[in-house]
Amino acid sequence: MKFKIHSSLSYQVNAPTTFIFNIHALKTPSQTVLEEQIWVNPYMSLEEYASHDESCRFTRIKVDEPMTFTIDYSATVDMQHKIIDERNSENIVDLVELDSYIASFLYPSRYCQSDKLMKFAYKEFGNYQTVYEQVLGISEWIYNNIEYTSGSTNTNTSAMDTITERVGVCRDFAHLGIALCRALSIPARYFTGYAYQLVSQDFHACFEAYIDGNWIIFDSTKLAPLNGLVKIATGRDAADSAVCSIFGDSMGTNIQVSCEVLEDAFFPYKYGDGQKGLSFQ
């Protein structure tokens, strides 16, 4: 399935500022970037680089004087998702077999205080028969118990805030899902990307859980089909995967995002579709 993605971000710069953008489509075995273009108006030099574990692709721009500018990114991406039958999922995660990278997603992080949610997680989800059913149960609980309200939270909102206040946006749903998974000793990581059929169009966040050797995608908001997602980055939480990190006196003034399918037939794969998981590996 091919997608055409585009993002346009504008900023007002009041003093010398360095920007680190994370808006490129990630290159993975299941996600091929066929073509892409990035440009800045007015023209400025930019530096592109990847994170050490290749989970993010960055663009760095240094602005030396007050001005307004816009950065645009567009790409054509071919997606080859893997559908995995989870009817025979293991009932626990074999922690001894995890390599150091996977194991790093077991620990609490800035927005995902899993150590504070262990009692709640085991009470609510400890009796499920398999790991996949546990994570599916977590996602379903978040969907049914957390109110999705645009603009209800900010960049300081954590999983503990979300489960207490029972309201949030996609990043908050993702952080809570990650925290509850980790509380049950299930590796989980943050996913940010472009989303087809998302209303209104914006960058979208959800999470992946490591189940039987695969990273399986879960979206507790149910706002977009899982096979309509194009991955930008993964990380421990939003702190690792921010669309833009600003170091200086500047503020965003406008954002536009789009994700379009380039093929006539699109069959949405909904989250929790029976006992089958979707992987972006």
Image: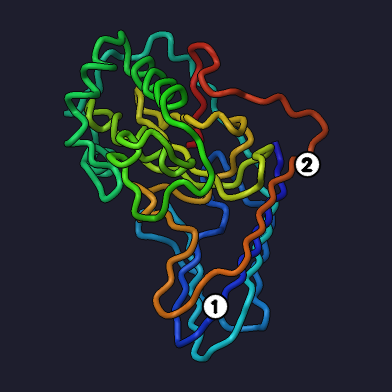
Between residue 58 and residue 64, name the one nearer to us.
64
Q: Residue at 51% across / 40% down in the picture?
A: 149
SS under mark 2: loop
Q: Residue at 74% across / 44% down in the picture?
A: 260
Q: Residue at 65% across / 39% down in the picture?
A: 198
Where residue 181 appears, as percent x and y from the top left, is 30, 29
Q: Which quadrant of the view contains residue 168? A: top left
Where residue 200 appears, as percent x and y from the top left, is 66, 44
Q: Residue at 38% across / 9% down in the picture?
A: 88
SS under mark 1: loop
- Specify the amino acid type for callout 2: Leu
Where residue 161 appears, as percent x and y from the top left, is 31, 42
Query: In the picture provided, is 94 more to the left or to the right than 191?
Result: left
Where residue 175 appears, as percent x and y from the top left, is 36, 40
Residue linked to disc 1: 46
The colour scheme used here is rainbow
The answer for how far apart the CA atoms under marks 2 and 1 are is 29 Å
Q: Which quadrant of the view contains residue 36? A: bottom right
Work out which quarter of the rendered image holds the N terminus and state it. Answer: top right
Query: In the picture provided, is 262 more to the left or to the right than 126?
Result: right
Residue linked to disc 2: 262
Say few, some or many: other residues with alpha carbon within 10 Å of mark 1 (under 14 / 14 to 19 / 20 or more). some
